[in-house]
Structures are given as C-alpha cells and as structure tokens.
C-alpha cells in the first residue's frame, strides 16, 4: 500500500439534488455534522488538495458548511458552469481546476469509504490511462475512481452529444479496470462503494453510526 500523501486531488461531487432522499446531498448531516465534513476529515490527509464540486449557485452555502473554525480547511470550491448537466459537468469543472496529475472522484454521500480501497486503486494509476475504476458485481464504479485531466477531451465530446452520466465517455477514453478479485483482499471492501441515495439508506447508516460511533 502507498504510504504518505498521494500526488493527487480529492474531488467530492456535491451538486446532487437528492430528490429521492428529500434534501440536497450537500446538506446530509449526522449528529450535527455534515456528512461531507466527515468524509473530508477522513480522506484529506491522503491527498495534496481537496476540491468540492457544487452546482450552480451553491458555492456560498458550501463555504458556510466547510469554512468554519477548526473544520475542513484548505478546500477549493468549484461551481458548475451550466445547470442540469449532471455529474459529468461536475467532473469537467473539477478536472479543469485541479493542480495534480490525478483526481480521486467520489460523491458527498459516500460515508463508508475506506482509505485502503482508495490506495489500492491508486496503485493502478499509470501513464497511458485516463481513468482507473473498479468493477464490482460486473459493473464499473465511476464514483469511486481516479481520473486524469487527460480524459477532458473525451468528457467534452460526450457532453457535446448531450451525455450526463460519468461513464458516458468511457468508450472514448483509456480506462484501466481493477477487477473485484484484487479488491477482495481487503476486508469489507464492498461498503466503500456504497452511497446514501434514499431515506432507507440514511436510516441504515444512522443505525450503523450509532452502534459503532464512527
């Protein structure tokens, strides 16, 4: 496993409307703390910089959440240029703003994320790849993956065709896939990829949080 700070950026996509859960993803909170704060506190020591990608008009509220004394310092905020273009727009704007060769991109609703899974994926980031992502149960996981700015032309070509999803440009990029058997060496690796998308998901997380204190 990699030791020390990765020469990469942590990019957290926080522009989701959270329609199924009833609140914007940026505002998900547990025990008086926003979920995104917990994620940054856990993962920021791994990365050279932290970028929070928000929707149009959301920068002010994101700054209020994360610029408190003794909270998540040194966070760079990037706002979408256009509304309604989905996570692909968030990725595009973040990659243009980053100052490192790679970005680990995740959602702000992924509180189970495990540092050892992130560092294992990092081992596959190499010259000649645009994306490094895992395949679990036969599906690629685009919101728990490393992206190089070299994929920007493919992202922009996909967006020009009206694409919204993160995987829409994969066929036009050099994607390195980390198969599940490589991840299986890590205990409970599956939960690292889980997000909070519904009220039921949130209830399960709160139950787990109260039992473990994590």
Image (cartoon, rainbow, N blue to C red):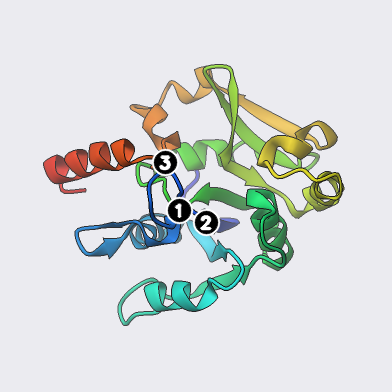
Do the CB atoms of the residues marked 3 and 1 lie less than 8 Å apart? no
Mark 2: few/some/many CA within 10 Å (<14, 14-19, 20+): many
**Compared with residue 82, is residue 46 higher up or lower down, i.e. above or below?**
above
Out of 175 and 7, give the one closest to the viewer.
Answer: 175
In the rendered structure, the answer to whether residue 176 lies left or right of residue 109 reads: right
Q: Is residue 1 visible?
A: no
**Where is mark 1, residue-wise?**
108
Residue at left offset 66%, top offset 56%: 84
In the rendered structure, the answer to whether residue 47 lies left or right of residue 36 reads: right
Mark 1: few/some/many CA within 10 Å (<14, 14-19, 20+): many
Mark 3: few/some/many CA within 10 Å (<14, 14-19, 20+): some
Marks 3 and 1, the one that precedes in the sequence: 1
**Compared with residue 142, is residue 102 higher up or lower down, i.e. above or below?**
below
Residue at left offset 58%, top offset 64%: 55
Residue 193 is labelled as none
Out of 60 and 66, give the one closest to the viewer.
Answer: 60
Do the CB atoms of the residues marked 2 and 1 lie less than 8 Å apart? yes
Q: Residue extending furthest left? A: 211
Marks 2 and 1, the one that precedes in the sequence: 2
Mark nearer the viewer, 3 or 1: 3
**Where is mark 3, residue-wise?**
197
Do the CB atoms of the residues marked 3 and 2 lie less than 8 Å apart? no
Residue 181 percent location from the top left of the image: 51, 17
Residue at left offset 39%, top offset 59%: 36
Q: Secondary structure at mark 1?
A: loop
Residue 7 percent location from the top left of the image: 60, 57
Using the rendered view, name the quadrant where residue 129 is placed.
top right
């Amino acid at each position: 496993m990699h030791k020390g700070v990765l020469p990469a950026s942590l990019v957290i996509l926080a522009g989701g409307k959270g329609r199924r859960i009833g609140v914007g993803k940026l505002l998900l909170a547990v025990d008086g703390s926003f979920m995104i704060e917990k994620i940054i506190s856990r993962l920021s020591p791994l990365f050279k910089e932290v970028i929070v990608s928000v929707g149009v008009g959301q920068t002010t509220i994101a700054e209020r959440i994360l610029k408190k004394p003794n909270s998540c310092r040194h966070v760079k905020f990037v706002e979408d240029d256009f509304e309604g273009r989905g996570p692909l727009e968030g990725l595009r704007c973040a990659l243009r703003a980053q100052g490192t060769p790679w970005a680990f991109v995740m959602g702000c609703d992924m509180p189970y994320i495990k540092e050892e899974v992130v560092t294992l994926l990092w081992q596959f980031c190499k010259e000649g790849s645009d994306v490094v992502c895992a395949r679990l149960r036969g599906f690629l996981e685009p919101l728990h993956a490393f992206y190089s700015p070299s994929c920007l032309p493919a992202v922009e070509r996909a967006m020009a065709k009206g694409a919204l999803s993160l995987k829409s440009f994969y066929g036009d990029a050099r994607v390195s896939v980390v198969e599940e058997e490589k991840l299986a060496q890590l205990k409970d690796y599956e939960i690292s990829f889980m997000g909070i998308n519904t009220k039921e998901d949130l209830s399960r997380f709160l139950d787990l949080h109260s039992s473990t204190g994590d």
